[in-house]
Amino acid sequence: MERPLGQILMANRISILMYHQVGKFAPMREHRANYCDHRRFAGQMAFLKGFGYRVLDLDQVLACVRGERSIPPRAVALTFDDGYANFVSHALPVLRHHGFPATVYAVSGRVGGQAQWFAQDSGRPVPELMSAAQLRVIQASGITVGSHTVSHLKLAEATPERQHRELIDSKACLEDLLGEEVKHLCYPYGSFAPDTVRAAAASGYLSATTCLRGPALPGDHPLVLPRKAISFGDSLIGYFWKLVVKNKPKPQLLEWRRASP
């Protein structure tokens, strides 16, 4: 019996979704991928639940890309960059309601502080980042906490020595704070190079997510995982389009796939 076209479109791939802030925001024209309205986020999570999506944690994603388990139909993973405090008030209750796992990437040197990299864009409010206590709260709720380096720098522009320190020091700091192994990494700004990938492996990370656009496939390098960015303006139709139809990988992702062993 032939499978419906919808099942074929959603088979053998994982849409790793990239979020940043979730909350109440004024309409905007710039930096839209850094924001998701809390009402739209609730609608997106209800969409996943209602249409039978399988929301995987990153350990399950790793097993799929390594070929250790098959990818279930409608496979999705949820990731949140930077560790914003508004995750606790706006995203966490929705994720708890649906029983969805997710990963939050924290900047270890900014825990309990502010996202000072916003200050370079005049007129943009500088948001608060989660405190150590809040990171422990989300961890206790089943959310995975990963590393987003020590200082949120562009790794590809740093020396190999600085990259290594940013990666290993962030991992050690978060492990001390949380009392468990930190296995997952996200490259700030999507900035990485081959020596960054080697530094991530040497530092003990098992996965790393990028800003390379496309779905994750079996055989993908676990330290070069692609994602799909969710933007402030994404309606449910746009959300569906990114999940089901927009699966053609960008050229840069294809280049990395060809270069990977």
Image (spheres, rainbow, N blue to C red):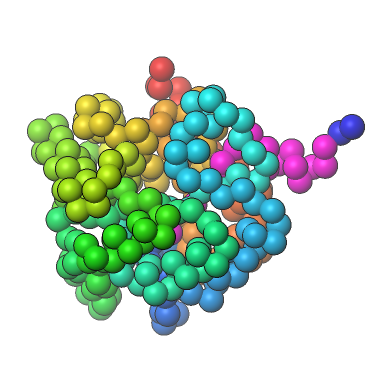
| Quadrant (top left, top right, bottom left, bottom right) of the N terminus | top right
Q: Residue at x 44, y 42 (%)?
A: 58
- Quadrant of residue 157 in the image? top left
Location of residue 107 in the rendering, given as x and y in whole percent from the top left corner: 22, 55
- Residue located at (53% from left, 46% from top): 56
Please tell me which residue is depicted at 53% across the width and 56% down the height of the picture: 100
Q: Residue furthest top?
A: 261
Residue depicted at 17% across the width and 43% down the height: 172
Q: Is residue 128 above or below residue 230?
A: below
Left or right placement of residue 17 versus residue 169 in this view: right
In this orientation, which residue lies closer to the viewer: 261 or 87? 87
Residue 10 magenta-highlighted: yes
- Kindly tell me whether residue 149 is visible in this rendering: no
Left or right? Give the position of 6 relative to 84. Answer: right
* Position of residue 139 measured from the top left corner of the image (x, y, whole percent): 35, 56
Of all residues, the one furthest to the bottom in this rendering is 26
- Residue 144: x, y in percent? 38, 51
* Location of the C terminus (image quadrant): top left
As drawn, 180 above or below 95: above
| Vertical relation: 155 (above or below) 197 | below
Does residue 243 appear in this view?
A: yes
Q: How many numbered marks appear?
A: 0
Q: Position of residue 106 (x, y in %)?
A: 27, 55
- Residue 54 painted magenta: no
Task: Give the side of residue 1 with respect to residue 33, left or right.
Answer: right
Q: Which residues are magenta?
A: 3-19
